Amino acid sequence: MTEGDSPTIARRRVRLALRQARERAGLTQNQVAEAMEWSHSKVIRIENGDVSISQNDLRPLLALLGVKDKAVVADLVAAARISRTRQQAWYQAAEFRDTLTDGMRKLIEYESEASEIRSYSIYYIPGHLQTPAYAEALMSRFEDELSEDQRTRRIEARNKRREVLETRPVAFLLMVDESVLRRTIGGPEVFAEQLRHLKRQAQNGYVRIRMVPFSLDASVTNNASFDLLQLGQGEVLYRETGLNDEMIEDREAIAKHRARYDRVWSEAAGEEDTIQFIERQIKELERGNTEAASPDNT
């Protein structure tokens, strides 16, 4: 076990090890549940990380799965003990459990532990970089789908995410489609404020940002924004579409997204050119002209 593992990282290590051991043993989740005299849902929750497994449950489960190496067993038992020391985080409170998706709560949990975050957005500025006014304007577009309380909680969650991430060291790379820097969500005044905030964050070194210009013949994904988070010895993938979101830990899927992200990052407009584009957008908005300036950054 890595020295200083947090409860989040320790719980992830245990559940991934259990899932891999089950697959090596050729057992289904239902077969494990029957052998352990558990409910099927309990196995699912353990492997998904929704609950932490107790040491008393872990030892017989490892035996069932054929994990007999004493050092490995001791390591996982120690990790299981650490995983159960966590206190309830703000995003696990009832008001947020009712308004945030399972994928979003998992993203928030992992964000607080990630050493690197690579984000790609095709529609709007990512949540933890949004100003309150921009977030409110964006949430207002979902008034037919979300109640006022749900929208309020989601805005509050974005503010809390921003506060957490801005107070801890994390390498943050942001790649956005050109449309993200042109779409005047909230109107010219609100959007100009948002772009000024994004520019400051880039100039103070908090985020490295590159734009994928319309003129670049490159496709990251056809219809989904996503985040790649580096956690300890591995990565996780959070993917979002207009209809749903999900946390993915499949290595093959993550590797494909990472390879594509890195390739397009190297082809996109450079950071200096992107900031200059943002500055031109701000000037146009400040002059009251909502039509974007002609790009010259490819």
Image: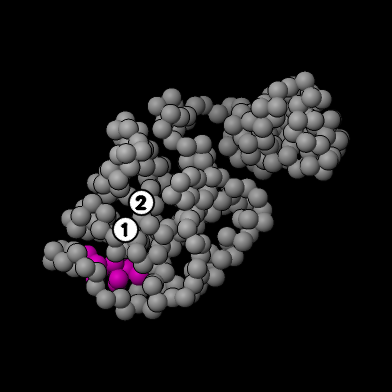
By secondary structure, the bulk of the magenta-drawn segment is best described as helix
* Mark 2 touches mark 1? (CB < 8 Å): yes
In the depicted structure, whether residue 270 falls above or below residue 193: below
Q: Which amino acid does label 1 sit on?
A: Leu
Q: What element carries label 1?
A: helix
The residue shown at (77%, 20%) is: 37
Q: Position of residue 290 (x, y in %)?
A: 19, 64
How many marks the image carries: the answer is 2
- Outermost residue toward the left? 287
In the depicted structure, whether residue 164 falls above or below residue 83: below
In which quadrant is the N terminus drawn? top right
Q: Foreground residue, 118 or 85?
A: 118
- Camera sees residue 5: no
Determine if the magenta segment contains residue 92: no
| The disc label shown at residue 275, or none | none
Q: How crowded is mark 1: few (under 14 residues within 10 Å), some or many (20 or more)?
A: many
The residue shown at (38%, 72%) is: 214
Disc with the residue nearer the chain's start (2 vs 1): 2
Q: In this view, does 281 lie to the left or right of 48?
A: left
Q: What residue type is labelled 2?
A: Leu
| The disc label shown at residue 198, or none | 1
Q: Where is residue 156 in the image (x, y as percent from the top left)?
A: 33, 37
Q: Where is residue 51 in the image (x, y as percent from the top left)?
A: 61, 28
Q: Give the range drawn in magenta.
A: 274-283
Q: Cα distance, mark 2 to mark 1?
A: 7 Å
The residue shown at (36%, 55%) is: 124
Check disc 2 and report the residue beneath it.
Answer: 129
Q: What element carries label 2?
A: helix
In the depicted structure, whether residue 28 falls above or below residue 162: above
In which quadrant is the C terminus drawn? bottom left
